[in-house]
Amino acid sequence: MATRDHGDPGDAPSMPPPLQPPTKSDRPSAAEQARTIAAGSNAATLATLTADGDPWASLVAYGLLGGSPVLCVSNLAEHGRNLTGDPRASVSIAAASSDPDPLAGSRITLAGEVTRPAASEQDAARAAYLDAVPAARLYLDFSDFTLWVLQVRRVRWVGGYGRMDSATAEQYTAATPDPVAAASARAIAHLNADHADALAAMARAYGGYPDTDVAVCTEIDRYGLDLRVHTPRGVAYTRIGFPTRLNSADQLRPVTKELARLAADNSDNAAKAGH
Amino acid sequence: MATRDHGDPGDAPSMPPPLQPPTKSDRPSAAEQARTIAAGSNAATLATLTADGDPWASLVAYGLLGGSPVLCVSNLAEHGRNLTGDPRASVSIAAASSDPDPLAGSRITLAGEVTRPAASEQDAARAAYLDAVPAARLYLDFSDFTLWVLQVRRVRWVGGYGRMDSATAEQYTAATPDPVAAASARAIAHLNADHADALAAMARAYGGYPDTDVAVCTEIDRYGLDLRVHTPRGVAYTRIGFPTRLNSADQLRPVTKELARLAADNSDNAAKAGH
């Protein structure tokens, strides 16, 4: 799914390959990544068209109706006038990241056309926006503000350097946000601080790097863990898939404990077999 | 300069007016705000036009050549193809903010057309991008990456709710980033933690609110301090201008100390006059 599509001149750092295939390396689809990123923020940059057809980038807040961004913009603001003049629009949403290089983080573009909410979805659209932007209760009903729903037609996900894919509107609509996303930062910190041995054992047993000295968890989602592994051959990245897809953040602790136990057993058996 | 341009239904919270005119309330111009926000980040959202003329929003990193954003994008990426097809472009840049409401923060839109750097500015453009995005040394010379310079024609600054203005390209080019911006967060924290009495004295003496009980500094720039003042009449916002515009962050401490000393004297004299 992820592709590397640049004309590599060949002088970038290279990575040691796995010594055996990773056991399970399922990952979220681009549609799932996009739904997760959209659900994780309330700030986007909107691209609209001016009366001259020029592109205009501007910050907006948004709520979500299903996967559709709900905007509330003033008709007196440039982007409000633009949407009234031409409904074509696109939003870019960036996932939170502590990396000083903005391009190392994940982000999405959702593109389509805005429409006024249908009568049947007016209340839900209003509630979605207020849920994401509580301060809007002070101005949502000002005469010059309009609610718009972006009907998503195209979805592009970029997961950092060299990880990117598109999704169809149908895939995006059918996908769900990752239920472990909100808990992942804390789980990553806990695993790295208190369970470094377990991570290294997982990388050796299931990640394809039996020569792992140290493994650091860099990401967790409903399908598994991303690990950065340090080996005598250099630094590499691998994936430890969960036995089944998680449906709630509560499952994170038992499933990682079980993986750690199995990996440790595996390592004991390997040690015994070696004797 | 700042304008409030919404159709206020009249039920938003109101603010107690000053009891006397603030002594000096100079503020940065929209052009200065825009140059400061541009200089304070390396991440923007780019709006470009697809082959169909649709707007496309996407995350980019940027460096600065004067006030002109320098972009480095892959021709294989959608925004790279878009710029090759139509040079019209716009970037939105948001100032760092800890407010959960994204619309409370400051942001700018710069719009114009991208050009390839002139031969004479090629090295400077490359250096500007690498200075902002050091990791780009690994891919800047890949065959598919192109450097672009956004020639800014229109500038829009929004400083949060109800504060907004435009600047011409000439004003933007002539303005400079605020030299105290990088030091301001720390100075604000220090003033609020250790000099609350001095801030309240400034609000009473110079801010137009002689009935201030508590004053909290919310922003510092080269022209002065923004204060939130708490009075028996309610909460209001005021401005304490510095006697002269600061040209370096080193001037921040002496000028605020002097203002605090004068405000305290003023308060002593008022107390004496009252006896």
Image (cartoon, coloured by chain):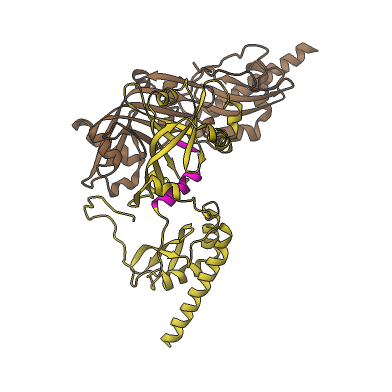
Chain colours: A brown, B yellow
Q: Furthest residue to the bottom?
A: B275
Whole-percent x, y for residue B9 in the image = 21, 52
- Residue B180 or A116: which is nearer the viewer? B180
Q: Residue at x 40, y 44 (%)?
A: B108
Tell me if residue A240 is in the magenta stretch: no
Q: Quadrant of residue B115?
A: top left
Classify A7 as above or below B160.
above
Whole-percent x, y for residue B128 in the image = 55, 38
Quarter holding the C terminus of chain B? bottom left
Question: Does the rendering let one see residue A23?
Answer: yes
Q: Quadrant of residue B152?
A: top left
Question: Does the rendering let one see residue B101?
Answer: no
Main SS of the magenta segment? Answer: helix
Total numbered labels placed on residues in the image = 0
**Is B238 placed left or right of A270 in the picture?**
left
Q: Furthest residue to the right?
A: A275
Whole-percent x, y for residue B273 in the image = 43, 86
Q: Furthest residue to the left?
A: A119
Q: Furthest residue to the front?
A: B120
Whole-percent x, y for residue B145 in the image = 52, 24
Q: Residue at x 29, y 35 (%)?
A: A50
Classify B9 as above or below B267.
above
Tell me if residue B43 is in the magenta stretch: yes
- Residue A258 or B124: which is nearer the viewer? B124
Instruction: Report the magenta residues as a range.
Output: B30-44
Classify A60 as above or below A271.
below
Quarter holding the N terminus of chain B? bottom left
